[in-house]
Amino acid sequence: MQVLKLFKLLHRTRQEVFKNDTKALEAARQKINEEFRNNRDETSEEKINELLKIGSDVEVILRTSVIQAVHTDSDKIVLIPRKDLLQDNTPYIDKPTKKQES
């Protein structure tokens, strides 16, 4: 049951991360399917748990680290971050002020 759940999660993540990029979508689909197919006859519980951990780690990396980019010119690339990757940014202060004690 955990295996099927991870398989579906990886495919959902793939669809979100590589949205509108047909080459990346297809390459990721093939890689996910290949890895699961290559290990489908695994019976060792220890090995299955190890593979589940690797798959789970891959999903987290895809979801939190991959950003799409589009070539707009020969020397320009536009980044297209997903909303869940954007974080509040704390502005840089060149000369921090000391906190005043009350």
Image (cartoon, rainbow, N blue to C red):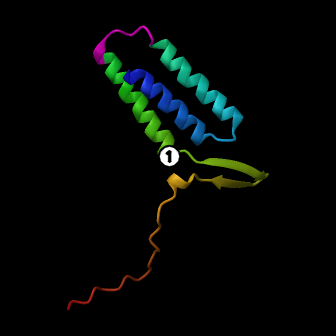
**Residue for point 63% across, 47% down:** 68
Task: Indicate the amino acid at tag 1.
Answer: Ser
Q: Residue at x 45, y 34 (%)?
A: 58
Location of the N terminus (image quadrant): top left
Q: What is the span of residues highlighted in magenta in the rendered image?
A: 40-46
Number of numbered callouts drawn: 1
Q: Nearer the viewer, residue 34 or 97?
A: 34
* Image quarter hosting the C terminus: bottom left
Residue furthest toward the bottom? 102
Say what secondary structure mark 1 lies in.
Answer: helix
Q: Is residue 100 above or below residue 11?
A: below
Q: Position of residue 4 (x, y in %)?
A: 44, 22
Tell which residue pokes out farthest to the left in this image: 102
42 or 93: nearer the viewer: 42
Residue 77 painted magenta: no
Identify the image quadrant of residue 48: top left
Q: Residue at x 66, y 49 (%)?
A: 69
Q: Quadrant of residue 83?
A: bottom right
Residue for badge 1 = 65
